[in-house]
Image (spheres, helix red, strand yellow):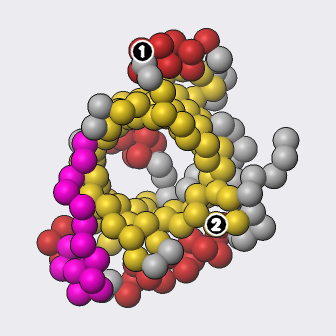
Amino acid sequence: MTAPSTYEVEVKYRIGDLAAVEAALAVRGVVLSAPVVQDDQAYARVGWEYGQSKIGMPFARLRTERGRHLLTVKTPMANELSCVEHETEVADRAQMDAAIRQMGFYPTVRIRKARRTATLGLMSLCVDQVDGIGAFLEIERIVSHGEEGERIQAELDRFALTLGVSLERATDTYDSLIRAARTGI
């Protein structure tokens, strides 16, 4: 396998006071988009179960947004939020679901959220209202191969702290957070 040229690095926070986060972003000139509903089905490889490491394991996501269907495959590198990512649009969600299952993946968790986005410098900002688990702020960057994901996450975290609002860092992906909320784990 050849090394990827770029990958996605993010930090994620549970929002304590959504209005305060919106105000703190506005002070920095951040204008969030209108909300867009994303309907995601997460998939894992047969043999993988929650509680096992995600590092080096590919995971698939089938998303419908504004009538478009996107297939994303992410492979966590340093941690769950630092991933090699490949994404493409697909024409038929049902056929892609069947293909994903045929390739040895099984559906794990369905994730529905209303997402508002913005950019600030090199950062992409997402304010998500996730069904069943609440409001979150994601801050992400696309980085070059060779850049240390954990160092970039520390930089993104420093930015989040400058907002001066109540944020609780989450190190899990939405599928893991939703599963934990449903099972009480």
Left or right of 117 on screen, residue 62: right
Left or right of 125 on screen, residue 59: right
The tag earlier along the polypeptide, 2 or 1, is 1
| Coordinates of residue 126 in the picture (x, y in percent) | 35, 61
Circle on res. 117: none
**Amino acid on which disc 1 is placed:** Ala
| Coordinates of residue 118 in the picture (x, y in percent) | 33, 67
Q: Give the residues in magenta.
A: 21-37
Q: Residue at x 48, y 27 (%)?
A: 90
Question: Disc 2 on helix, strand or loop?
Answer: strand
Q: Are marks 2 and 1 in contact (CB under 8 Å)?
A: no
Instruction: Depth check: give the residue in front, 60 or 64.
Output: 64
**Amino acid on which disc 2 is placed:** Val
**Occupied quadrant, residue 48:** top right
Instruction: Depth check: give the residue in front, 134 or 35.
Output: 35
Compared with residue 138, is residue 89 higher up or lower down, i.e. above or below? above
The Cα atoms of the two marked residues, 2 and 1, are separated by 33 Å
Q: Residue furthest left?
A: 19
Tell me the residue that label 1 is attached to: 94
Which quarter shows the N terminus? top right
Q: Is residue 30 magenta?
A: yes
Left or right of 168 on screen, residue 43: right
Tell me the residue that label 2 is attached to: 143
